[in-house]
Image (spheres, grey):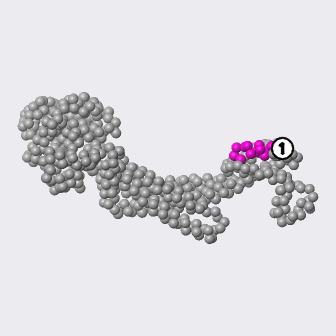
Amino acid sequence: MRLSTWRYAFRDAAGSFRANRFSSLSAIATVSVSLLMLALFLVVAINLDSMATTLENQVEIKAWLDPALKDEDIGRLSDQVKSFPGVQSLTYVSAKEAMEKLADRLGNQQALEYVGTNPLRASFEVKAQRPDDVAPVAQAITSLVGVQKVDYKSDTVDKLFRITRALRVFSLTLVIALALATIFIISNTIRLTVFARRREITIMKLVGATDAYIRRPFVLEGVFFGLVGSLIAAALSSWIYTGFLRFAAANLPFFEIVPGAPLLRNLTLTLLGLGAVLGALGSAVSVRRFLRV
Amino acid sequence: MMIQFRGVSKIYPNHVAALRNVNIAVDKGEFVFIVGPSGAGKSTLVKCIYREELPTRGSIVVDGRDVTSLKPSAVPYLRRDVGVVYQDFKLLPNKTAYENVAFALECTEASQREIAKRVPAVLELVGMKDKVKALPIQLSGGEQQRIALARAIVNSPAVIVADEPTGNLDPDNSWAIIRILLELSRMGATVVVATHEKHIVNNLKQRVIAMDRGEVVRDEEKGAYGREA
Ligand SMILES: Nc1ncnc2c1ncn2[C@@H]1O[C@H](COP(=O)(O)OP(=O)(O)OP(=O)(O)O)[C@@H](O)[C@H]1O
Ligand SMILES: [Mg+2]
């Protein structure tokens, strides 16, 4: 592609921006509001998702072992469990350690002495890699000889699972809805420009301009709307999030808020990319109808 | 052969048969008038050359391109090879004479240097080099049509088609436009002019293709507008 082609496209895009200053600026404003909503929703969703993941990771499978097992049997069993797919880590808790933990919890160091013999059993504490590995891993451990009982908080896992899935579906739906709204805003504004220039487009087709050439200035204009709108949205959402982080550090010590460092940079890049793509799509939609000559 | 119609029929969606089994062959450098009563199919024929309309049946070859089976992406390149002049000029009102002509070259993605070289040359050819900065409303009909003609030829097309190019002009301006078209055909362009101008056709003794109700009823070298006229 020749440089001059781009020069003509930029000149025409700038020209129509100037000619439609008012509707261009209001399109940019509307696009930034729409993208700002999208951005704020995105950071909320990311935070909820990160909390859910933290909780999910705390779900543990507990497998109580036959007291008759010898140390080497336990070692072999432990290796076996570790080799299951989906297992992230395994901690062995001996009967003695279990009793010490219990005593700790009861605040009574003499618990052992009262009972005389230790009624607790040794166990494995197994962590799964992902929440949906929990059930199959538990199932697999149950079938091992030497394991007496396997337990995990299945209802908690299911509930968490349902919440995070709903959250993801909801975020996706909202992001798509906002993206469509943005395309709609941009295409409506570009439609005015295209309509004002429909005579010109007809003549362009008749003197042998390619569709790509005709589309280019409109697409540039749409991309420009999208980029400026997303820059504004990124700046505003970064400012809001930074403020929220400061507020949370002081007032919400129990919540682990996702830090701003990589998040806001990624958010800005995502918004810019999204703005450009949505702008291009929005204007391509508007021009299409006028290319049939 | 520069333009070849073989068994071309055009039936519009409203079932009007605008062309019926049209066979024409026009050589390189020829000058042809298309005449006939209103509704005979002259405009339809002309539009088929640069594929503003597609025929319902038959084949059309223009400068080696099979127009009827052209891919949509190849249509712009056909149109760069066929300069078109319209009865209503189709100039852009917000662009100057110079810009209107330059615009056609920009559309073919020509460089600025090429534009700066070729636009003044064609404006000179049509005798408009003094009015390059004028907007269309500041020009007379004849001047506007010269600008439109300059735009049609700025790409050096092999074929120039004009659909009633003098329909809105007085006799002097009409003659001026036709003379330029003749000159272009002498320089090697193939020129097809659909017209109602009896006087001009009868005077010039060029090839005449007469149409009636979608059919070619007469095709004569050094022809006249009509036998009875
Ligand atoms: N786009 C169209 N849709 C339907 N019918 C059409 C269309 N264009 C032309 N026609 C019909 O096709 C026939 C031929 O029209 P065309 O314009 O080719 O005639 P013409 O010879 O150019 O007439 P004129 O001398 O008045 O310009 C006419 O009956 C006309 O009504
Ligand atoms: Mg006509």
* Residue B65 quadrant: top left
Mark 1, secondary structure of its residue: helix
Q: Nearer the viewer, residue A281 or A57?
A: A57
Find residue A44 and report its horizontal and vertical position in percent.
57, 61
Q: Quick check: B211 above or below B87?
A: above
Find residue B47 and report its horizontal and vertical position in percent.
24, 39
Q: Nearer the viewer, residue A18 or A74?
A: A74
Q: The disc labelled 1 sits on which kind of residue?
A: Asp
Within 10 Å of disc 1 (Cα), the crowding (few <14, some 14-19, many 20+) is few
State which quarter of the image contains the C terminus of chain B: top left
- For disc 1, does the CB lie below 8 Å from ligand 1? no
Residue A23 in view here: yes
Q: Residue at the location (27% across, 50% down)?
A: A199
Q: Name the residue under label 1.
A: A73
Magenta-colored span = A76-87
Find residue A75 and report its horizontal and vertical position in percent.
81, 45
Q: Residue at the location (39% across, 50% down)?
A: A285
